[in-house]
Image (cartoon, rainbow, N blue to C red):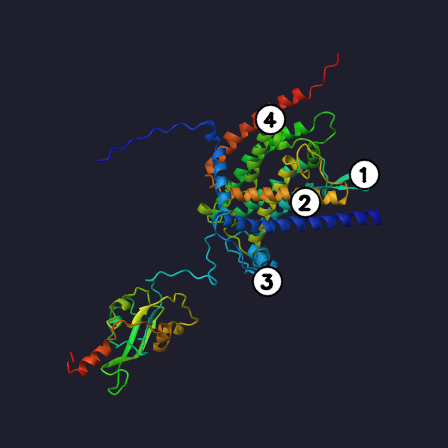
Amino acid sequence: MMLDAETLQLVGMKFLFALLMVGAVMTMAGYSVLAERKVSAWMQGRVGPNRTVLPYVQYIPILGPFLRGLGIFQPLADGLKFLFKEEIVPGHVNKLYYYMAPLVALVPALTTMTVLPFGEFFHDNGESFPLILADLEVGILFILAVSSLGVYGIVLAGWSSNSKYPFLGGIRSSAQMISYELAMGLSLLPVFLWVSEPGSGLSALSLTGIVASQAESTWLIIVQPVSALIFLIALFAETNRLPFDMPESETDLVGGFHTEYGSFKFGIFFVAEYAHIVVGSAIFTAIFLGGWHVFPWVADPWPENWLGSLLGVGCFLTKTVLLIFFFIWIRWTLPRFRYDQVMHLGWVRLLPLALVNLVFYVILVSWLDQPVATN
Amino acid sequence: MAKTVVLERKPLSLSERTYLPQILTGLKTTFTNMFKEKVTLQYPEEKPVLPPNYRGVPTLVKDPNGREKCVSCQLCEFVCPPKAIRITPGSVPEDHEDREHVEKAPQEFEINMLRCIYCGYCEEVCPEEAIFLQNEYSFSGYTRDEMINDKAKLYELGGTLPDDHYKWDKKKEAEEKGNPH
């Protein structure tokens, strides 16, 4: 088969978009690290990082000191530090898997964003396309499948480190992932039922379909609060955030799965963790918070052109950022669960609750969607 | 004897068993904390307020007439728990104008700041009120030798403090009136 110019152009464009998307998500991950440090500092009555500054920027009259105080350049300094630190590989590790683990942790986090819609592009001829790298018909299934692969990075790190604390962290992490994956999947089933009502013509497994169903209609968090709650809790567990910080558990496992890691390999783990949070927040926004639509029940107050696209993306980003703030906020409010409490909550509380929720919505949806009797 | 009373615990209500209202209360607490005044001291720009009895680096002081007060009695050297002080005693020449009736002064006075534990015993024991632990607390150096304060450095750090007694002036006056002791 010959590669014609059109194919090449398409591939080139996709490549460019992918690079842009990776850039955007990685930047957001970097700045959520800063946000974590700043918000934690504020909640504890501290100031947070406020010293790092690029040369000459601090001499800009008001803006310079303001940016410095906000610690805007801190992620840059942190990244450079990770790059230039001495790379220590302990003698007792399994080298191949030790080097592989950070990559295995990062790749799923970056892969899930390919099916993540973040806006809408209005064409001149009135058509609109979702802004997305790959509009899969089964986007949600893809996300559920790929995002749980991230646990392999943690398990590999724990195992290849050949040391007890990372090992315990890895085991805990896999057990937690298995327990919460179930509740997460079950909590999404009522969403599919609700969205794919007969005649709507929307594919409920595609994220764009779910977002489209919330345009000028209620948000799914309003009609399915229990699903949203279970999904949110499972999301916390899947992204290994406090109060489900099992693989790290600084207080009893030293550093958890990354105890034996340093310099840039640790940095990759770190970025992967925050990329998971960013992507997770975006998914929650798309499924339950109406995606790029501003208010429930109301049509978007902007024109259907490039400006509307931009504002829609801005709206989506705002919601995602607020959700990331919520993640951080929870972290500095709640203490970590004990391991058995995590298991108890997952299996004894969330799983039955998700099942009951599913059964309830099965009955409700089948009652609502029954064909109108014609006589 | 106080009698131990076992209190009956009320069973948790349904809302309490979900923990969700409690989590919301916690979230409210942390959120309001974000807007409270920060307690951080921006150290090199802002310095802490030291209490009046602060014990900083030990220093030698001069009296308001600019005379050195230490008479090298070596009590501080003797009392110093980590043996940080080393004094080489010396005598004051008879015809020294400012310091008549003072027989001795330290020829060399060294305080090893790597040994000093800032206990303040030297200040407490000094009969001449010549050694004080003042407010300097961030003392550092690049070599071990730099961390040994010699006499010149100690006087530089100490400066002059007000004196209530002028002990040697009184002694001189008494001797001039024919009443040496």
Q: Earlier in the sequence, mark 4 or mark 3?
A: 3
Q: Which mark is residue A358?
A: 4
Distance in Å between CA atoms under marks 4 and 2: 33 Å
Q: Earlier in the sequence, mark 1 or mark 3?
A: 3
Q: Is residue B64 left or right of residue A155?
A: left
| Number of other residues with Cα within 10 Å of mark 4, as a class: few under 14, some 14 to 19, many 20 or more | many
Q: Which mark is residue A314?
A: 2
Q: Do marks 1 and 3 both belong to one polypeptide chain?
A: yes
Q: Is residue A47 left or right of residue A144?
A: left
Q: What chain does badge 2 belong to?
A: A
**Residue closer to the observer: A265 or A373:** A373
**Residue A34 drawn at (x, y percent):** 56, 51
**Residue A253 drawn at (x, y percent):** 46, 46
Q: Which residue lies under the disc numbered 1?
A: A126
Q: Residue at x 48, y 59 (%)?
A: B42
Q: Which of pointers 4 and 3 indicates the residue nearer the eye? A: 3
Q: Earlier in the sequence, mark 4 or mark 2?
A: 2
